[in-house]
Amino acid sequence: MAEAIIVDIAGEIIAKLVPQALERVGKLWGVKHELELLRDIVSTLRAIRQIHVWLEKLKNAFYDAQDVVEEINIEAMRGELRGHNEMVKEVRTFFSSSNQFAFKLKISYNVEAVREKIKAINASRSFHLAEQSEKREETHSFIREADILGRDDDKKIVMEFILDSNMKEHVSILPIFGIGGLGKTALAQFIYNDEMISKNFNLKMWVCVSNDFDVKKIVKNIIACAKKKETKDFSMEQL
């Protein structure tokens, strides 16, 4: 619940701090730079919303940020009202030069306080969490079918596509996509090792494309799989 609230509030804050709003409101009160910093750090924090340890703190900090942005917008609308109706005494008094200066100081202080609070929450995560490595492990085609559970329906759908007689004369690509840990590689291994696939395809090759995308290395691996032996250090043209 707290996560959903944070996502909603962060979205509202960022939406209200679009460049046009920053130009209009920021220049009016002289706090454009502070608001830009606030928008940037809220955007950054929204990206780590899945970290539940700080959700409650983030929720409160985002509420504070939302209050500041709302206050600035309200004062901006009052300023526009003053421009349309100079006869409204209360508005004219409120927007005296002394009150404008006081409001600018107040907003600058509030924005800075919220920004520092969110920065502190963001910084604290580095002391409690180890960043997940983005390095992708090399995969292979070997798998124990006993380890695959509940993927029979998915396998059937993919197998029907691969073994479709209308597809034999064409080079087809069937992507399997989804979030990490969903079992995409396991499903591909499950299908690759199926007996029907081996009967229908004389040549099968399993090639892993890692984060370090090297076309030459990929081509060499494909040829090595096809020839069942290691390729020499050929150039791309020779390959």
Image (cartoon, rainbow, N blue to C red):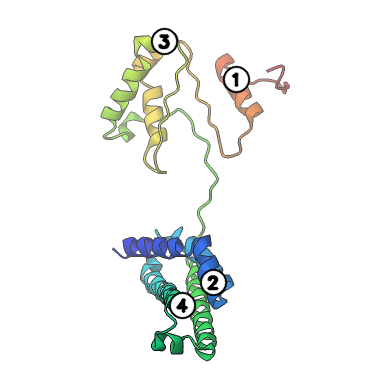
Mark 2 or 4: the one toward you: 4
Label 1 vs label 3: CA separation?
A: 24 Å
Labelled pair 1, 2 in contact (Cβ < 8 Å): no
Q: Secondary structure at mark 1?
A: helix
Residue that label 4 marks: 79
Image quadrant where residue 221 sits: top right
Residue that label 2 marks: 26
Q: Secondary structure at mark 3?
A: loop
Q: How many neighbours does mark 1 have within 10 angstroms: few (below 14), some (14-19), or many (20 or more)? A: some
Q: Earlier in the sequence, mark 3 or mark 2?
A: 2
- The kind of residue tagged 3 is Lys
- The kind of residue tagged 4 is Gly
Mark 1 or 2: the one toward you: 2
- The kind of residue tagged 1 is Ala
What is the number of the mark on residue 117? none
Label 2 vs label 4: CA separation?
A: 13 Å
Q: How many neighbours does mark 4 have within 10 angstroms: few (below 14), some (14-19), or many (20 or more)? A: some
Residue that label 3 marks: 168
Q: Earlier in the sequence, mark 1 or mark 3?
A: 3
Of residue 80 and residue 84, the one placed in the foreground of this image is: 84
- The kind of residue tagged 2 is Gly
Q: Secondary structure at mark 2?
A: helix
Label 4 vs label 3: CA separation?
A: 71 Å
Label 1 vs label 4: CA separation?
A: 73 Å
What is the number of the mark on residue 224? 1
* Residue 129 horizontal/vertical position (percent): 48, 63
Label 3 vs label 2: CA separation?
A: 63 Å
